[in-house]
Structures are given as C-alpha cells and as structure tokens.
Amino acid sequence: MKRRFWGWGVEGAGPTREQQAKLGRTIASRFGAGELTAVEPPTMPELDLRAPRVEPPATLASICTADPEERAGHTYGKSFRDVWRALHRDFSNPPDLVALPHNEHDVTALLDWCTDARIAAIPYGGGSSVVGGVECDVGDAYRGTVSIDMRHLDRVLEIDRQSRAARIQAGVYGPALEDQLRPHDLTLRHFPQSFEFSTLGGWLATRSGGHYATLHTHIDDFVESITAVTPTGTWESRRLPGSGAGPSPDRMLLGSEGTLGVITEAWMRLQDRPRFRASASARFTSFEQGADAARALAQSGLHPTNCRLLDPTEAMITGTDDRGDSILLIAFESADHPLDAWISRAVECARDHNGSIRDDAIHTSEAREGAREGAAGNWRNAFVRAPYTRDAIVGLGVISETFETACTWDRFPDLHRSATEAVLDAAKRVGAEPAVVTCRFTHVYPDGPAPYFTVLALGTDGRQLEQWAAIKSAAGDALIHNGGTITHHHAVGRDHRPWYDQQRPELFARALRAAKTTLDPAGVLNPGVLLDPRPSP
Amino acid sequence: MKRRFWGWGVEGAGPTREQQAKLGRTIASRFGAGELTAVEPPTMPELDLRAPRVEPPATLASICTADPEERAGHTYGKSFRDVWRALHRDFSNPPDLVALPHNEHDVTALLDWCTDARIAAIPYGGGSSVVGGVECDVGDAYRGTVSIDMRHLDRVLEIDRQSRAARIQAGVYGPALEDQLRPHDLTLRHFPQSFEFSTLGGWLATRSGGHYATLHTHIDDFVESITAVTPTGTWESRRLPGSGAGPSPDRMLLGSEGTLGVITEAWMRLQDRPRFRASASARFTSFEQGADAARALAQSGLHPTNCRLLDPTEAMITGTDDRGDSILLIAFESADHPLDAWISRAVECARDHNGSIRDDAIHTSEAREGAREGAAGNWRNAFVRAPYTRDAIVGLGVISETFETACTWDRFPDLHRSATEAVLDAAKRVGAEPAVVTCRFTHVYPDGPAPYFTVLALGTDGRQLEQWAAIKSAAGDALIHNGGTITHHHAVGRDHRPWYDQQRPELFARALRAAKTTLDPAGVLNPGVLLDPRPSP
C-alpha cells in the first residue's frame, strides 16, 4: 500500500469520487448551499518541486533520497491548511532530502552533518501532525532541510513479560506495533485517531492522547525510559517504574516535539489484553447536565476507560444519536475482573445527574479466548478512518478544523460558550457561512474536561486559507483567554506558537531554550517548533 | 510547641529517657550486646556557633534572624548523620542567618540580595530531608548561607470546590493544611512519614511519596500549577487538569530540590474525604511469593490504596505479625462507592498467588458522617511518630539507616538479594555488627515495586559516622548496579549525588545545568544539590 503524498493514509482508501460527491450533496443540502465541486487531487507530474539545495555526503547517500514523491509526501503534516495547500499544488517548501535511517548510528551521522552544514533536521514519524510540526518552511537561515523519517526503526526489540514492558523502536506505526505485541498477549492500548499513520516516537514527542478517557490519558504515563539522539550525543534514561531522583529526564523529552533530539526507542509499559467489558450510554437534555455527570464520574475513582460526552450535533454527525440530546458514552474494560460493580455505580452516578439510561443500553461481556474486540473494535476502526472523510470534505472546499483544550471545571461553561461564539463570529466576519461548531469531551479529569471542538464552515472559493486562519485565531484566543491550554493532545508545532507563548511561563521558555542550546548548539533540530529558530551563525 | 533544634519534631514528644533506656535494653538483648548508653541531647548553651559571616541589609533585617537556636535548628536535615552530628554537638556549618519571608515579595528580595552578595540561599520547608537537602555546608566560594524558612506562608488561599482543587502556600505543614481543608470536606491525602514536620513546598521540590501505594504514588500527580520565585523572576504555570503543550513546566520544578527556584504556592488537586473502606491482610511463607501477589495486584487495575508487603522482620518490628511470615496489607478507600467487589477480587488474587487470608481478616466499613478515620488513622499516627523512635535509637549509638528505590519486576529478586548482602557485608567489614536489614514495599507499580530497606547495626563508639558511610555507600552501589533508582521518594540532596550522577543521562545533567544557569545565573540556590556548586566569580 502506497502512502498518499498529498493527504491522509494510503492510495485507494477513503471515500471514492462518487462517495465524495454524495458527501458534497449532503453538506450542501444541510448548509443550504449550491453544488460543491471537488478539486481533483494532484498527481506527481503536475508538481514542479524546487531542486534540492543540498546534497548528502557520500557516507549518507545510501540513506538519503531526493525522490520527488518522497519529498512531496514529507512537505506537510495533515492539518486543514496542509491538505488544502497540497490539494492546490502548493509544494513551495519541500524538504531538500528525505533521510531514512536504519539505526541510531545513522541518526547520529545525519545530525552531525546537519550541524556541520547548517541544515534544518525535521524529525518525521507518521507525518500526522495537525500543527505544522513537520513542516519544512524554516526560513533562509538554513542552507536546506532534511526530513528524517524513522519508518525503518520499526521493531519491538525486547519484551519483559513479568514487568509487562517492551523496548520498542520509535519509528513503528500503531498497527505494526500491536501486531508485534499480540503474540505475547500484550497491548500498548494507545489509539489516537492517527493510530494507523503515526508512530511511537511521534506519540512521545507530542504527548499524544490515547485510548483511555480517564487516568492515563496521555502516552506520558506509559513511559519507562526513552533513548534519543541529539546533536551532542545520545540520551538514554534508566528503565524505572517510578523515581524521585531529581526532575524527570523523560518528562523533558515528552512534548519536546523534535527540538531537543530524535527519539529512537523507548521502554513502554504495556497492558494485558482486555477480557471483560461493560458499557452504557446516557442521554441528557442539556450539554451542561452531561458535563456534570462526566465530572461526577471523573471524580468517582471508578476510572472508566471511556467517558466521552457528545453534544447533540456531534451525536448526530457520528451517527450515535439523532434525537437532539447530549450523549455520554461510558465504558470499562479489564483483563482481570468482571465489571458489574463498576458499571452499576457509573450508571447510578449518571442517573443521579439527570442522565437517562435505558436498562437495555447497559452491556457487560466477557470475550472468549481469541475473540476480536467486537463493537469497541468497530468503533475504533470507524474513528481512525475519519481523517479520510475529512480530506474529502476539504477537497469540496469546506473549511474543516478541530481545536482542543483542557480547562478546570469552573472555567468550562465560559470557555465552551466563548469558544463557540468566537468561532462563529469569526466565520461570519470573514464570510465563511454557514458554519457549525460541535463539542465533545475526549478525556476527563477530576479537575476538568478536555473539550474537543469541530468546525465546519462553507468557504468562499479562493479565500479558504485566509478564512481558516481567522477561525483558527479566534479559537486560540478564546481558549487562552478562558483558562484553557492551546492543546491537550495535538501538540504545539509551528501553528500553535502564538498561544503557546502566552500560556507557558516565560522563565520556563528561557530554561527550555537554554536546554536546547546545550543539546543542539547549532539550532538545527526542528527550528520554529516550541521556540523561535536560532541557527548558529 | 517548640521545635527540637537537634532532631525530629517538638520538645517533649517522643520516647522519654526511661522509654529510651528500655528500648536500649531490648536492642541490646536482640543484638546480644552489652548496655547501650544514651547520649544526652545537646542544649543551646553548650553550642558555640560560628558568628554570622554576613549581615542582612536594613530592608531585610525584619525578616532575618541570627538567633542561635534558629540557626542551630536549620543546620541539618534529619538523616542519621544529621541527628548524629547534632547529638554530638557538631554544628560547625550553621546558616549565617535564617530568613522568614511572609510573601513572594520577601522571597524575591532575599534572592536578589543573595545574588548580589554571593550568599548561598537554602530553601527550607520542614527540614525533614534525609539526604542533606537543606544542609548549609556549601564551601568557601560563598560569602555565607541563608536558610530561607517558608513557615509563614502557611495558608490555603482559595478553594475551587467544583474542580476539587485549592491554591495553597508552600510553607504549610501537613496537619495545618489538612485542618484548613477539613471544613470543606476535602483532603490532599498526602501522608509521607514526615507529614507532621514537612511542607507542601518541600513535598513538591522533592517529589515526595505519599499515601497511595498504587497509581498516584508521588505528589507530582496532584499538581495543577506551581508558582516559584527564582533569582531572575517569578515562574507561574497555568492551572490545567491536563495539557500536551510542550514539555511540562511543572515537571521541571518537581524534583528540582530548591536549585531552580523557591516554590511559593501551588494549585493542588484534592480528594473528597473517604467514606467507604475495605482491607485484608495476606500471609506468605516467602517474600518472593508475597512479591508475586503484589505484582498481580499492581497489574490488576484494581488500584488499591494500600498494597504494602512486609518481610518477616518488618512485620515483627512494626508489631504487625510475629510468626515469621511475610505480610501483604491490602486496602481500598473511596468517597463514592462500597468496595466489596474490589476487596473480593483482591483477596482472590492474593489467594491465587499463595497468600493465606483468613475470612475474618477481611473488613469493609462505611464511616458515619463526621467519623474519624479509625484504624487507618491510628496506623498513620504511629507511622508518622516513628522518627522520634529513630532519634532515640541514634542516641543509643545504634546505626539506623533507610534506603529506598524502585526497579522493574525482572530486576527485583537480584536487587533485593544484592542490596541486603552488600549492606551486611559492609557492616561486617567495618565492624558494625550485628546488623539487620529488612525490606518492605512502600509503593507498587504495574512494572515494578518500590522496595524500602531499613538497616539497624550496632555501631562502634566513635566510629559510627564512618561505619554509616560504608553502609550507605554499599547500599547505593547495589541499587545502581541492579537497575534501581538511588531514590524513589527521599530525593537526591547532597548525600545521593554520587549515585544520582551515575543514574541520570549525562545530557540531561547538562540540560538541567543550562536551565539552572539561566534561572540562577549567580548559582546561589541550594549549591551542591543535584548539581555541583558553581557560584558566579
């Protein structure tokens, strides 16, 4: 299966042209708009990529390629803006080369060369960034850009069954990782929406948000140790289940987004494969009531695996429900014990908070040995395939954007209202109408939810990027002004920098800059991400 | 109640001289030794403290004191070596001044002065460090030392009931903190053994280990945001339930042990006061079997509040059991739901792993409104009063040391054996015999335990410090060589530096040094802790 160079996934997957046309008719009818015409995806011969500005030294030639399709495929991540530009044949800043290291030694050699030659080194996992995290437009201070694609480091190297942990190379994609763990009856159970086309290293570098709606929401908590190659050497932390010896080295690399080093492998904590499952869905006449119930569950100590609240439009769009109610999906899973007591109390708790749950909407099950994951697996498959649909929508000229955050419960009602209003106002101001904003909780904490907003707006032909920018900016401002974070699990990249810079303590920024300068004195690692580019003279 | 300047706690508390003498007879009889004579604790008139080498500027005079008893009381933490030196009238490196700031402005002014005058600033919470974390012997490169005692910043400033969080000043002691939360029916539930004489700021700076044996073992997980004053300004992170925006600023301060800044306040996540409780204790004929059961429980997803395994000697010394078995204490607590299903499955799990549990040793209870904490509270009271007994033992000339670690399950059997043997060998080599080493698990993780070792050895009069050093060194080497951390929750301080330096990635040390140099360019903050002192010239 060949990766699509201009958008999500692999060629031949996702909606067909006919399905896309049908999607266009549905959207047009909902928006009361005229016919939406799909842009024809680009083909390689149409692109006229800038010639590579740099050439690898002979010692690195065998792991570097200037193949145009590789370069085109590594030009962008997968944000609305990325896919839009790709669909409209804008590949003005491709990497000069794509490097494909096979081991840490290769990575070291690449970083040495980049350092010596003042070439920007962009670590690349699956390329699923929606925040400009792998983009190669780094300014003229660098002589060129190399996208370092880690896909050949794709093995589970070692398994410690007793400690339920594995040493895993950073370039492995989600499905290949799970395939290698399955024979050991183990699973990482980290299922971001990008699961099929993102890597362990990418998850770690961006503090990816996963499967568990409560408790261990980010990949961070599953890390035992990390190995990273930096321009000044290799950083390897000790495998430990817990430690109090100084600030955590791993926590400095988690979220460093390729600015401090290239993560090459990690010891990860694994799970036994779940055997018991229980689920229920609760209906609420208002989103606020649903949020109260989600809060009660998050504070209950029951630690549901799923606790996702959908507003009425989300429920409708995802096919979960179409009666205009908000829906709270509750689920538990365990490899160890039946979950009757857990789901009973969760149902009681949701009902106490005005949730309506039919008795026949409460399910418990025990998987037979070797059974597949049934409904949960089906849902996940649909979930991870959604980005294909998003690309089809973008191809129809519709602005499709998501933004996500987390805030404490006391701030949530204002944040929810302000963010929704700000986005609709911005869409109106720039003529991207009609527009719709939906909200769901992807994760919930005892002290606050992680709300996830989806925006669909009818763009004006030729103005979509500018309209998107206005919407994105209004959303970011609303999140920051209402006590949220600019990102709960999509990372900062280049696109979130204006709000990230407001959010983080200025002294932390200085400390991080100092750490970076020590590890990457020439400033070649992912310039512009987290910090301003500062190449050595 | 007046703090004891030479040892744990307050004057008048702990064993009386008669109780100490009786303790001496018990130990002598167990060790087959002759009479143990208790050293008479020092009195202030006996001490001849070095005159202060520095004088505060007029603007700071009102918050600084050169009172000899304050200076003596801030000379040391509470390790064996600290108490030993204090009992033997060695106060050769007292702080020149003790500063008692009332607010952040005072802290800023103090750090400005220390920076300008090249004076070492030692942040001081409750002074319970057992790793030389508050010691004032920082070398001659500094003109003097000021111990910055945060005890006046002792208020809960704000409560967000809905998000179950509070803004709390860093200098508050454990009991005073709980007293202020109780009227709101909330609790931090962080009960390190130092609870009575340690502070929130100290817990955060040292990544203190608390009440929960699984899941949220360190204080780290309860942090929403931290404010710290550094020599270059104030660092304040945003209150967030979760975030993926770059590396976590809070995780850089957690464990920084006063080297990056003085923590002045934090927003902390709180708990509802527990109402339901369940407990059981399981008996194992070998410690290894008990460890297997603890592992199964840690991997079960039941998340017991207590899951502490005691070896036979620990069980005997703590009065838990005297039949020569290892004992696993299992407990659950909840503010939300009865725990029958939880304890049933835990008991089943322990029995499946060769644990013997009598049916009448399984308890569940529901506290009446306003009821005190009963047995759990009694146990905790005994636990937090143990350091008084330790001081009495030190006063008898007995070497009493603890060391603690965490390692993955695959490494534990070797680590356990090696550490025990290494300590006994070292004790024998230096003539500190007889000696006994006991082990318990204080916390357990899915991927490994946190073993806690206690050493008692009969010292040779006048040689105890040297004997202690040999034992400490053998223990540290054994932990590091067998895949452990030099500390799970006692911190690094000055005493653990040799092993910490081996354990951490060298590149992380450089990054941390760079961060420190940015925040504390004059190098005045707690020199020698985590990093070598490096004062500005």
Image (cartoon, coloured by chain):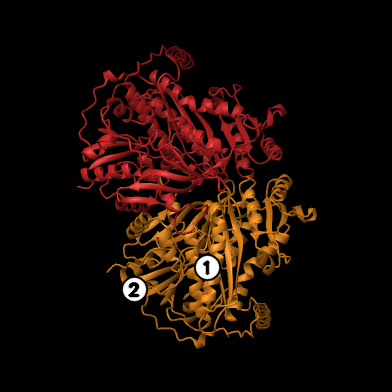
Chain colours: A orange, B red
Q: Residue B433, position in %: x, y?
A: 42, 21
Label 2: how many Cα within 10 Å (few below 14, some 14–19, many 20+) = many
Q: Amino acid at mark 1?
A: Ala
Q: Residue at x 63, y 74 (%)?
A: A389
- Left or right: B132, with B143 as reference point: right
Q: Residue B32, position in %: x, y?
A: 46, 14
Q: Amino acid at mark 2?
A: Tyr
- Left or right: B326, with A109 as reference point: right
Tell me the element at label 1: helix
Quarter of the N terminus of chain A within the rendering: bottom right
Residue at image mark 1: A422
In the picture as drawn, the residue positioned furthest to the bottom comes out as A46
- Left or right: B446, with A59 as reference point: right
**CA distance separating discs 2 and 1:** 38 Å
Question: What is the chain letter for disc 1?
Answer: A
Above/below status of A74 relative to B289: below
Q: Residue at x 29, y 29 (%)?
A: B71
Residue B433 versus residue B279: which sits nearer the camera?
A: B279
Residue A522 versus residue A380: which sits nearer the camera?
A: A380
Above/below status of A339 relative to A474: above
Discs 2/1, front: 1
Q: Which mark is residue A142?
A: 2
Q: Residue at x 67, y 49 (%)?
A: A335
Disc with the residue nearer the chain's start (2 vs 1): 2
Q: Which mark is residue A357?
A: none
Q: Residue B218, position in %: x, y?
A: 50, 42
Residue B175 versus residue A257: which sits nearer the camera?
A: B175
Question: What is the chain letter for disc 2?
Answer: A
Q: Is residue A198 visible?
A: no
